[in-house]
Image (spheres, rainbow, N blue to C red):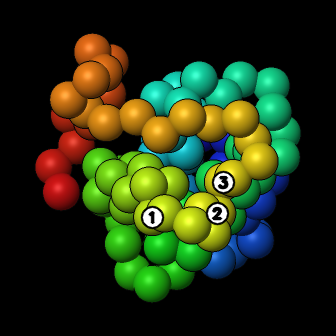
């Protein structure tokens, strides 16, 4: 759960919401092979928090929307971090949903 904590305002989200957001951030970072790049992690966390503030709480949906934003074309929000667009069709990496129902 620690991935998103530095970016979440105290009291803004319930503990379960923070856990869902953290899971989504971890999965996006894992999917994109982002390890020590603090700026990229911060950008991903900000996008997850933005979606959560709009009401989304499902980690799977959060992850998919963040990744969809990456493939949005010109003006990508993660451009500059050396991230290459990837599609499930050419990627054998499967992300878990940790048994959560959305």
10 Å neighbourhood of mark 3: few (<14), some, or many (≥20)? many
- Residue corresponding to mark 1: 72
SS of the residue at dot 1?
loop
Do the residues under discs 2 and 1 have CB atoms within 8 angstroms? yes
- In the rendered image, which quarter is residue 46 located in? bottom right
- Residue corresponding to mark 2: 77
Question: Residue 64 got which mark?
Answer: none
Residue 49 against residue 55 in the figure, above or below: above
Residue 52 against residue 83 in the figure, above or below: below
Of callouts 2 and 1, the N-terminal one: 1
Q: Residue at 81%, 33% (x, y): give it.
A: 37
Q: Nearer the viewer, residue 42 or 70?
A: 70
Do the residues under discs 3 and 2 have CB atoms within 8 angstroms? yes
- CA distance for labels 3 and 1: 10 Å
- CA distance for labels 2 and 1: 9 Å
Residue 36, image x, y percentages = 80, 25
């Amino acid at each position: 759960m620690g991935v998103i904590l530095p970016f979440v305002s105290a009291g803004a989200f319930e503990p379960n919401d923070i856990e869902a957001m953290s899971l989504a951030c971890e999965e996006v970072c894992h999917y994109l092979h982002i390890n020590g790049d603090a700026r990229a992690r911060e950008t991903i966390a900000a996008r997850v928090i933005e979606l959560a503030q709009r009401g989304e709480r499902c980690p799977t949906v959060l992850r998919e929307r963040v990744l969809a934003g990456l493939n949005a074309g010109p003006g990508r929000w993660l451009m500059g971090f050396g991230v290459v667009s990837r599609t499930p069709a050419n990627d054998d990496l499967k992300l878990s949903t940790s048994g959560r129902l959305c």
